[in-house]
Image (cartoon, rainbow, N blue to C red):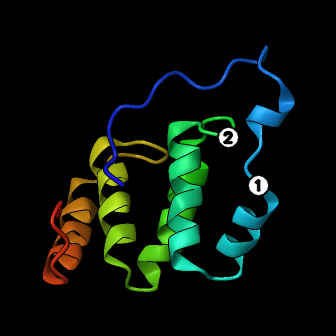
Amino acid sequence: MTLVESPAPASADEPRAQLTVSKSSKIAAYQGDIKGTINLGDSYYHGQGVVQDYTKAVELYTLAANKGDAEGQCNLAYMYNNGKGMAQDCSKAVELYTLASNQGHARA
């Protein structure tokens, strides 16, 4: 999934059911499923199904990146490059983009 500026986070007035990610998505992510981890990170990044939380997105992208996943590395690089969820660190972003690029990731 390409990271772009997301819409505003869900408002407090929306029904609670719309603010939660499915339990199975969370279980998949925390059981080590890389695709599930990235998807859950994307949900937190975009505020889709959960309250937008860049710090949580960084945590999830880091899990995937640390397993050598190019999509996780690229998404985490984006977060470092733009200072979303952590302090901006362009050197770390370049390092992660390079790792993803070396695996043939198109956006890296």
What separation in Å lies between label 1 and label 2 (alpha carbons)? 8 Å
* Nearest to the observer: residue 82 or residue 48: 48
Drawn side of residue 25 relative to residue 6, left or right: right
Question: Which kind of residue does numbered mark 1 sit on?
Answer: Ser
Question: At 60% across and 38% down in the image, what residue appears?
Answer: 48
Question: At 48% across and 69% down in the image, what residue appears?
Answer: 62
* Rendered image: mark on residue 56: none
Q: Which residue is mark 2?
A: 49
Q: Are marks 1 and 2 in contact (CB under 8 Å)?
A: yes
Question: At 26% across and 70% down in the image, what residue appears?
Answer: 96
Drawn side of residue 17 relative to residue 48, left or right: right
User: Which quarter of the image is occupied by the N terminus?
Assistant: bottom left
Q: Secondary structure at mark 2?
A: loop
User: Which quarter of the image is occupied by the C terminus?
Assistant: bottom left
Drawn side of residue 86 relative to residue 47, left or right: left
- Decide: is 96 above or below 76: below
In the rendering, at what x and y percent does residue 59 appear? 57, 62
Binning the other alpha carbons within 10 Å of mark 1 as few (below 14), some (14 to 19) or many (20 upward) gives few
In the rendering, at what x and y percent does residue 10 appear? 65, 24
Q: Residue furthest right?
A: 16
Whichever of labels 1 and 2 marks the residue nearer the N terminus, that label is: 1
Question: Which kind of residue does numbered mark 2 sit on?
Answer: Gly
In the rendering, at what x and y percent does residue 2 appear? 31, 50
In the rendering, at what x and y percent does residue 58 appear? 50, 56
Count of picture labels? 2
Binning the other alpha carbons within 10 Å of mark 2 as few (below 14), some (14 to 19) or many (20 upward) gives some
Q: Which residue is mark 1?
A: 22
Question: At 52% across and 77% down in the image, what residue appears?
Answer: 34
Q: Secondary structure at mark 1?
A: loop
